[in-house]
């Protein structure tokens, strides 16, 4: 389904009945990343997925997609669907956006799950990587996207999930060049949300990949403890929804019950 926000089309899906769960995908992904997760969750819940600005079937809205701008578009969809109380599950970039939404609508949040994500802001090193990527991608978009996707998996899982990785790359290439650059700019400039997460009273869960090439799992465990969040460590890379799909479904079902 499509909604128009400030002349930008926003794609979303709305399935099931019960507790509302908002699934927010990560950078270079789209709503299809949840295709093998949603069927299990909609048995007892209402599940909403979206394509973020510049990803999948959603348009861009400017040249910097800040976490606040991403949040505005999602809030627009939720208001149109008349959803007030909900649980947020955000993968990577989706986690940053989930935190932004929670700051605005803290009374509406029943629970927040950061999936391979963090409340920390970018390090200076990470900011430099994003700046460099935005320069390189303008001349070599397809190669940059393919390389980025490959680097998200635990290296030893590459052969095992060869077919799935190919599909992820296909979906990633549906991200527009403008969407790529705008999201990187937004992530680079996002604020630190650790203090907010620590003082939030809704249910909080961090799902951590022990072999995550993007987020150091020991730092993520430290973060969970610092923010009074529950956490689970799985033997996977950054793509838990593929590398540990069945375990993730079980964990999410249990988290929803606790919320």
Image (cartoon, rainbow, N blue to C red):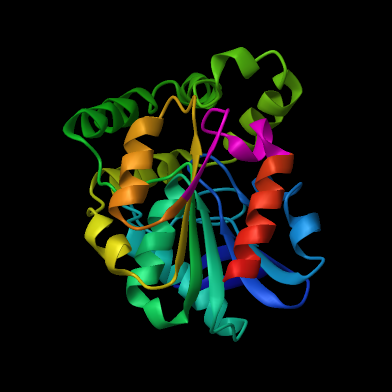
Would you place residue 195 above or below residue 145 in this image? below
Q: Nearer the viewer, residue 23 or 149?
A: 23
Would you place residue 218 above or below residue 81 in this image? above
Q: Quadrant of the N terminus?
A: bottom right
Q: Is residue 7 visible?
A: no
Extreme residue toward the left, this view: 124
Q: Is residue 209 visible?
A: yes
Snapshot quadrant of residue 243? top right
- In x, y percent, where is residue 181? 36, 40
Q: With 58 as the anchor, is 14 left or right in this view?
A: right
Could you tell me which residue is drawn at 47 percent across and 48 percent down?
231
Q: With 32 as the anchor, is 50 left or right in this view?
A: left
Would you place residue 129 above or below residue 176 in this image? above
Q: Is residue 156 magenta?
A: no
- In x, y percent, where is residue 195? 22, 60
Q: Quadrant of the C terminus?
A: bottom right
- In x, y percent, where is residue 175? 54, 41
Q: How many discs mark residues in the rendered view?
A: 0
Residue span colored magenta: 231-245
Q: With 144 as the anchor, is 160 left or right in this view?
A: right
Could you tell me which residue is drawn at 41 percent across and 43 percent down?
178
Could you tell me which residue is drawn at 69 percent across and 13 percent down?
159
Q: With 84 as the anchor, is 220 left or right in this view?
A: left
Q: Is residue 244 magenta?
A: yes
- In x, y percent, where is residue 55? 54, 48
Q: Nearer the viewer, residue 149 or 182?
A: 149
């Amino acid at each position: 389904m499509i909604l128009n926000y400030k002349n930008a089309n926003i794609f979303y899906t709305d399935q099931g009945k019960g507790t509302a769960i908002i699934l927010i995908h990560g950078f270079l992904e789209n709503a299809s990343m949840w295709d093998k997760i949603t069927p299990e969750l909609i048995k007892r819940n209402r599940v909403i997925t979206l394509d973020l600005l510049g990803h999948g079937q959603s348009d861009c809205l400017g040249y910097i997609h800040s976490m606040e701008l991403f949040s505005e578009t999602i809030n627009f969809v939720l208001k149109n669907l008349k959803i007030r109380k909900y649980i947020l599950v955000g993968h990577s970039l989706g986690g940053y956006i989930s935190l932004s939404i929670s700051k605005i609508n803290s009374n509406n949040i029943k629970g927040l799950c950061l999936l391979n994500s963090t409340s920390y802001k970018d390090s200076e090193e990470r900011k430099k990587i994003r700046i460099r990527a935005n320069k390189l991608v303008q001349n070599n978009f397809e190669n940059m996207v393919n390389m980025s996707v490959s680097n998200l998996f635990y290296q030893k899982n590459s052969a095992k999930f060869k077919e799935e990785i190919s599909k992820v790359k296909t979906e990633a290439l549906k991200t527009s060049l403008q969407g790529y650059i705008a999201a990187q700019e937004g992530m680079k400039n996002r604020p630190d949300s650790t203090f907010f997460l620590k003082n939030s009273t809704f249910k909080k869960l961090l799902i951590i990949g022990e072999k995550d090439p993007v987020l150091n799992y020991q730092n993520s465990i430290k973060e969970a403890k610092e923010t009074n969040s529950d956490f689970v460590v799985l033997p996977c890379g950054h793509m838990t929804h593929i590398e540990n799909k069945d375990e993730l479904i079980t964990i999410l079902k249990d988290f929803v019950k606790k919320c």
